[in-house]
Image (cartoon, rainbow, N blue to C red):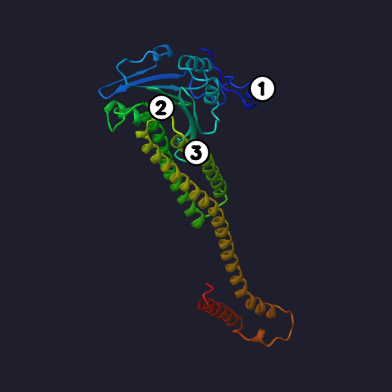
Amino acid sequence: MSHQLTCPYGSKGSQPPGSLVHVGTAHTAVPEITLICFGPEHHAIRKGISLEEAAKPDTRAEVVWLDITGLHDVSLLKEAGERFSIFPLTLEDILNTHQRPKAEFFEQYVFCVLKVAEPHPSGRGLVMHQLSLILQPGRVISFQEKPNKILHPLIHRIETAAGRIREFGADYLFHAILDIVVDQYFLCLELLGEEIEGLESRALDRPDQALVPELQKMKRELLFLRKALWPLREAVNALLRDGHPLIKRDTDAYFRDLYDHTVQIIDTVELFRDMASGLLDVYLSSINNRMSEVMKILAIISTIFIPMSFIAGIYGMNFRHMPELDVPWAYPLVLLLCLCIAGGMLVFFRRRHWL
């Protein structure tokens, strides 16, 4: 197999519509094909097979799920298009890993592309990659940009016959994949919410210059989420509103619930964006408050030393006839006077709540 690792937008722009060129980064050395066949009383999972084997699924299966992980092998995607009657324009969208989430309806299939969000391995921030889905009669084909574990719970449900996944058709499997991707956004938002709370505590308690780039990074991540979620809501709404013979009416209720989840996630993202924007104001206010506290302390210290400086200035004059110079106790008395003045001013400041 030939492997084309990546292609910049400039090279893509010189190609005619329908040209199969991979745009993005190759996350796997060799694409992996997994075939999952199941029915109410039967299931089978085969990994590491060829497209020729995948085109001949188990005859006992009512639903076939073909998962292709790794999109950089253009020849493999072209062969998949020929074997499963996928239009070149659809394959072009699958290969473009910067594609905007959307849903399209064709006579032979339903096509949907969306972004999958996962927590970064470091525990901070998110990693996003593309997932494309094709719904055909009795078959769902998924194209994943990189290996991940997000769909493993769904595979486990198929293996254990948990829920209704093996009782319904391919349209329900299509919905289940979308649903598990949307539910993943809830987990990501929970992690981002904890990060925002931590940044808020730092902005209030110990603001420093390192907080600003972290706030900017958080705002960028929320912006990327917003750019992925708003089109996803439109895509789910199109699946629900326009309909297709491959999507049964019994499944509409599940798509309505999915649409409600996308709206809820978008509302949370907008709330977090407002909070992240407000955190910068909180940071600047905290810096100004700290500066005001420092200036207040310095002003109090300066005010206390003004009368002491005045007294020291008087007795620092080089006049010969200064009566106090001949008094034995003049020096300690002046020091005691300075201490009394400083103590009196401190008491005055505390009573006025300036300290």
| Residue type pointed to by label 2 | Leu
**For the residues marked 3 and 1, what is the alpha-carbon distance in whole angstroms?**
30 Å
| Residue type pointed to by label 1 | Ser
| Residue type pointed to by label 3 | Glu
In the image, residue 150 lies at what x, y percent?
A: 40, 32
- Residue that sits furthest to the bottom in the current view: 323
Mark earlier in primary sequence (2, 1): 1
In the image, residue 264 lies at what x, y percent?
A: 43, 46
**For the residues marked 2 and 3, what is the alpha-carbon distance in whole angstroms?**
19 Å
Q: Residue at x 27, y 28 (%)?
A: 161
Disc 3 crowd rating (10 Å Cα; few below 14, some 14-19, many 20+) is some
- Residue that badge 1 annotates: 14
Q: Is residue 285 above or below residue 332?
A: above
Disc 2 crowd rating (10 Å Cα; few below 14, some 14-19, many 20+) is some
Q: Residue at x 48, y 22 (%)?
A: 70
Out of 287 and 257, give the one closest to the viewer. 257
Q: Could you tell me which secondary element the residue under label 1 belongs to?
A: loop
Q: Is residue 180 above or below residue 213?
A: above
- Residue that badge 3 annotates: 234
In this image, 285 relative to 261: left or right?
right
Total numbered circles: 3
Residue 345 falls in image quadrant: bottom right
Q: Could you tell me which secondary element the residue under label 3 belongs to?
A: helix
Disc 1 crowd rating (10 Å Cα; few below 14, some 14-19, many 20+) is few
Q: Residue at x 54, y 48 (%)?
A: 215
**For the residues marked 2 and 1, what is the alpha-carbon distance in whole angstroms?**
36 Å
Mark earlier in primary sequence (2, 3): 3
- Work out whether residue 267 can be spotted: yes
Residue 325 falls in image quadrant: bottom right
Q: Could you tell me which secondary element the residue under label 2 belongs to?
A: loop
Residue 55 circle label: none
- Residue that badge 2 annotates: 246
